[in-house]
Image (spheres, grey):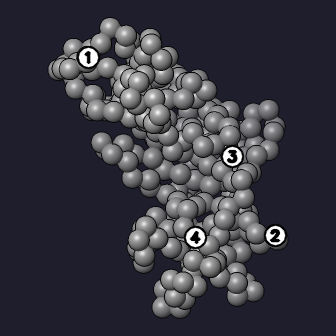
Amino acid sequence: MHEGENYCPACEKHNQQFNIVGFSWFPNRPINPDFKKITVLKNGQSIWRCQKCQSLWCLNLLKNHMFRVPEKNLQAVLNWSENQNRPSKKQIATLRKIRGQKIKHVDGLRSLAFPCRVILNTLEELDFCVVSLQNFAPFHYGFFHYQKIISFSQVKEIFPSDFALSAEIRNFSLKAPELDRDFFPTVILSPQGQEYTLVHSPLLFFKDGDLKGKDMRLLEREKWPTVLEMKKNIYKPEKHFQETLILGKL
């Protein structure tokens, strides 16, 4: 029994069928001896490991919630903490032209997301990159669908991506109206008049055949089709989109 103490719920038998990604933490309660703090990050957050199931967790800045950290992403979290990871003046100028999206988080956490193309220090060129500048360690599960997570310190140059949607489209999609249950669409238009419905917010890139994000424009709200027609035209991103996340600090 764990009544009255902080413990890892992921290794409890009745929870093993679920993918638990977070749980409440109570600072004034005792801590189960199987739950160990393994390091403290430079921004004050801490990393913990359950000695029974070996799961990793990150305690938020308010010290009232634990978030799951996949083992394969632990190094990305540690690198974010140890490195400066802040853009140069030249890189800041480029990012301002691209215009980032303010992503809302709980507990006063802040981040800006920029779709871009980059050249790394190794001279490798990558497109479909998302630069995320943030004031918290990258523990949220939203970060972990990326195939590759790298530190901003590995970036040599930043460029706008032809596949990135305009800032107008990206900003609208973040606050799109709910027109049906759990249906928050954004309708965009190609130069040929083809309509696409974006529902995977925040969607930063677009590619369909020869069409790229730079070709698309936001369709005026009064010209939107019916909900039924919008659902027929839902855009399904290709699997390689946003495959690289580049972590930096605000």
In space, the residues marked 3 and 1 are separated at their CA atoms by 42 Å
Give the residue at x 44% y 55%.
102
* C-alpha distance separating marks 3 and 2: 19 Å
- Pinpoint residue 136: horizontal percent, then vertical percent: 42, 35
Query: Where 220 falls versus 234 (above or below)?
Result: below
Q: Residue at x 28, y 32 (%)?
A: 24
Quadrant of the image for the N terminus?
top left
Q: Residues within 10 Å of mark 4 (few under 14, many from 20)?
A: many
**Alpha-carbon span between mark 1 and mark 4:** 47 Å
Instruction: Inspect this view and state whether residue 205 appears.
Output: yes
Horizontal side of residue 206 vs 105, given as left or right = right
- Residue type indicated by callout 4: Leu
Task: Count neighbours of disc 2 (C-alpha within 10 A) and say few if under 14, some if 14 to 19, many if 20 or more.
Answer: few
* Residue where numbered disc 1 is placed: 1
Q: Check disc 2 and report its element: helix, strand or loop.
A: loop
Q: Nearer the viewer, residue 123 or 70?
A: 70
Confirm or deny contact between disc 3 and disc 1 (CB under 8 A). no
Which residue lies at the image location 74% right of the left edge and 65% below the top edge? 207
Label 3: how many Cα within 10 Å (few below 14, some 14–19, many 20+): some
Residue closest to the far bottom: 223
Gap in Å between the C-alphas at discs 1 and 2? 57 Å
Q: In this figure, which residue is indicated by the disc labeled 4?
A: 198
Which label lies toward us, 1 or 2?
Answer: 1
Residue named by callout 2: 209
Which percent across, then down, holds residue 216? 67, 76
Label 3, on which residue? 243
The amino acid sitting under disc 2 is Gly
In space, the residues marked 4 and 3 are separated at their CA atoms by: 19 Å
In the picture as drawn, the residue positioned furthest to the front comes out as 14
